[in-house]
Structures are given as structure tokens and as C-alpha cells.
Image (cartoon, rainbow, N blue to C red):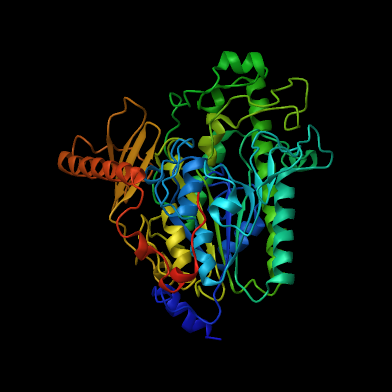
Amino acid sequence: MISRRSLLGMAAGGLLSGAAPARRPNFLVILADDLGFSDAGCYGGEIGTPNIDGLAAGGVRFTQGYSTARCVPSRAAILTGCYAQQINMDGGGGKMPSWVRFLPQYLKPLGYRSYHSGKWQIAAYPPVRVAGFDHSYAVMNQNQYFARRNIWLDDKPQPQEKESPGYYATTDIADRAIGLLKGHQSEHAAEPFFLYLAFTSPHFPLHALPEDIARFDGKYDEGWDVVRERRWRGLRRMGIVNCPLSPLQPDYRPAWNFTEAQLNDQIGPGQIDSAIPWNRLTRKQRTFQAKKMSIHAAMVNRMDRELGRVLDQVRSMGSFADTFILFISDNGASSEQIIRADGHDQSASPGSARTHLGLGPGWASAANSPFRLHKHWIHEGGVSSPWIVHWPNGIGDRGKLRHNPAHFVDILPTLADLAGGKPPALAGRSLAPVFRKDGTVPHDFIFFHHMYNRGLRSGDWKLVSAGPDGLWELYDLRKDRSEIHNLAARQPGKLKELIDLWTRKEAEFLLQSRQERPPGLSALLPPAATPRWRPAAP
């Protein structure tokens, strides 16, 4: 068994490639759904997330961790190490090229068992056959927290249930994860594990247990202006941001959202369709909006408590110190307000099974404080993710920050590196050196494109455009991460340079998505594994 210091040195220096330590780390990747950048306590929030905060206190927090702005492309990036444009996964309905491999398929030849519990939502499925998981509890339904629907167990569809008394999806996903860990301990204790734990919370509809909602009754009567400013000040005190608080942007809402008239007709009075100052709301609107945020908070708090049970199981296995834990959110908080599936019963108690509420632009702005905009946009509020890494036997720092920019495409090469494999050079880079020293993994660029929203980060410069007719904007994130001062007119040379780079990469990624085998794919596979492993066919 190598020493903790030796393991840290190899991991942080990127020396695990090709020469794995005697004890490879376990991997636990925890993905929240539509969690705002500042929802967790360790990122300035007031909700109450002691288990997430405990991971931050015992590990490191990244201040500039990036997603892709939406569920499907973010999950694809995490599990394949590719930008969504490289593999036809931005819209969710495309077909992945045949060369794509998933994280379990990189880890299997290195001796890992791979498990999945929770949301899937990638066009490539089922998870065991296609992605290489040994066991999977795949929740395909994201429209009902109180009934078991559209769930696949080891690639087999399970019976649908219109109603499931005593069932709550967040608890169920944690239960299944705990069961997978217990099974691993009893049958494969000598082998390292990878568990992909993908909660559906706090994605809409706003569904929470009554006792959880009661914890937050009255807490948000002060409104989103007060909450977002308090969070911003907390983030500054922590050293996570040094930018001003961005202004509310009432003119930005998803094109598919209901209008205020539709919301009032189908959901009831008290709805509002834009992020305007709290003092401009009527009393009825304030009451209803405060209730919605209390439900969102209840969902986040419940997710944290269920996560705590999973962490307790890892501790009971004696594996906590050897487990690399990553906590992230797939995108920023959502401003979506639509009705799906079972519809909305205006007579039902908010947050219950017969309701279908969305957080809306005002509270989404607070959840993403201090940044601009929300899920779907690639301004900082849409793509900035809380990003916590905890690994007692591999990271010496406790409670420290990492300002090194990172993107979801970096996760797969990082885990492959730490597992002792050859980090694949698909899009991202191994972040292992950053765990020892901040700023050691520069990126030539970080690419963004979701629907009509485009962008690219290069160094501290951020190029971004919103909507099909949006003009290119340019920001210096070192001074202005809240994206207030557009420098496009003052820096035409830099603007052109980044537009040209974005255009080249977009064309390159499109070409890769159409190829059967990109150049150099064979070099991406762990050399020792090549003779005895063949990836599962999509």
C-alpha cells in the first residue's frame, strides 16, 4: 500500500497514467439537477446543506467549474468526455457516433465495477448495454416525484404506477444507490467502484414532502432581491467571487415559457413571468412566490439529507478515505415555467403530487447569484456549477478553493488518470495536478454552444451570444464575471480572434460527430486493456 503522500504526489502530478497505485480510489460522482450556483451553504446559500458543506470543508471547491447549460448535453459530457457538439448530444435526439465510449468502459479494464442510480436522459440507452454499467437503476421520468414511473432496472422497464404511496423519488434514488454499494461490498469488496448518483432534484415540478416544506415556511417572505444580495455578499466573503452583483434581467425568459396570462389561467393568481424587483409584486404574488422558493429549498435540503445516507454507507464500508467524491450540478437554476405530464390542479396544496410548478425567473436569479441568467443560457448563471472534490487519501488541502477553470469534459480524463489509465484526449484535460496546486491545468479554450446560445472562454476572456439574433458579447471575467461590461466594441481584435476560434471549433466538432472513428482513437484506450476488452456496441 503506497503512502498517502506518495498517492497525492502521483495524483496531483498526473503520474497515475500507465502506472496505477496498489489501491486505486473509488469514484462517487454526485449530480444535482438544476441546482443553482449559490444554493448550497458552502456556495453562499441559506437552505441548509450540511452534507454537501461537509464535503467542501474536507476537500476543495472550484470557483469556475462549468457545465453545458442543460441536462442532456451536461450528462453526455460527464460520461463521454466530449462536448455535446462532438457527439450529437446537444438537442438530445441525435445519434451518437460509433466511436463514443462511456466512462465505465474506460474504467472496466482497470478493474472497476460501475453502478448508476438516478436520472439518465441521454439519447444513448439502455445504460448497462450501451454505457457499460454493471448495474443501473435508471429514472427516465422527471415529471413526478411521488410515483414510480418510467424506471429501468438493469435495462429492463419496470411496471408503471399511477400512484405510489410513501414514495419520493429523491429517497428512492438514494435507497437504490445504497443497495448497489451494499451489493458491491458483499460481492466485490476487493475491487474499486464507480457510482454515478444522479438525483432528479431540484428539477421542476416543485414537489416536496409536506414536512420538508414546513421547515422553510416563511423563510423567503423577504423576497429574491434580499436573498440574492445576501448570497452574493457571502460568496465574496468566502473568496469564491470578486465581481459585482449582476442586475435582474426581466426581458429574458425561455421562449417556451407560459405567458403571465397563461400562468394565471392554468396555475392561478400569484404567478409572474419575469424577474422584476420584489417590491413591484402584489401581496398575492409575494405570498405565492415565497411559497415556491420554500418548496425548492425543501427539495435541496432533502437531497442533501439523502446524500448523507449514501455517504454514511461509504463510511460503513471503510471506503470513505479512499473514495474520490465529486459533487456538481448539471446547469444553473431553471427559470422555466411550463406544465407537463399530469398537469396542475389549482386546488391541490403547492408542492404536492397533483401540482406542477416551476421556480421562475426571479428565484432562479437568486439561486444563480451573483451571475446573469439561468439554465439554457450560457452566460455565467446558466453554465456555472458548484464543483466540490473530496478525497481524504488524495487531497491534502481541506476547505480550500481552486480558481482553475474546469469543464464537465474534464471529468472523464481526470477519473481515468486517477484510476491509472491513459487520460483520453477527446476534449478535456485531467485536473489531477490542480488537486495539489491551483492554476496548474490551463485550457486553451472552453467551448459553449446550446441551441442558439454560443460562447467560448479563453484565459479570462469570455465570448458569448444569446438567442438566434444575439450579437457577440465580450467580457473580461477576471474583473467582470457578472458580465456587466461588454467590451466587444472596445476590443475588436480580441473579439475577432475568439469568434474565429469558436467558428473553427464548431466546424471541427461537427465533422467529428459525423466520423466513424476520429483520428487517434486507439491511443485513447488504456494500452494494457486493449487485448482483453471490447467496448459495448451502442
Up-down relation of residue 326 to residue 284 (above or below): below
Which residue is painted at 62% across and 62% down in the image? 54
Counting the numbered discs, the total is 0
Q: Among all residues in the image, which is located at the extreme left?
A: 493
Which residue is painted at 27% across and 45% down in the image? 508
Q: Can residue 347 be seen in this view?
A: yes
From the top left corner, tell me how far across and down residue 165 is, in percent: 84, 38
Q: Is residue 332 visible?
A: no
**Direction from residue 182 to residue 77 in the image, left or right:** left
From the top left corner, tell me how far across and down residue 409 is, in percent: 42, 54
Res. 25 image quadrant: bottom right
From the top left corner, tell me how far across and down residue 317 is, in percent: 71, 72
Res. 455 image quadrant: top left
Foreground pick, 190 / 50: 190
Q: For the N terminus, give its image quadrant.
A: bottom right
From the top left corner, tell me how far across and down residue 490 is, in percent: 18, 38
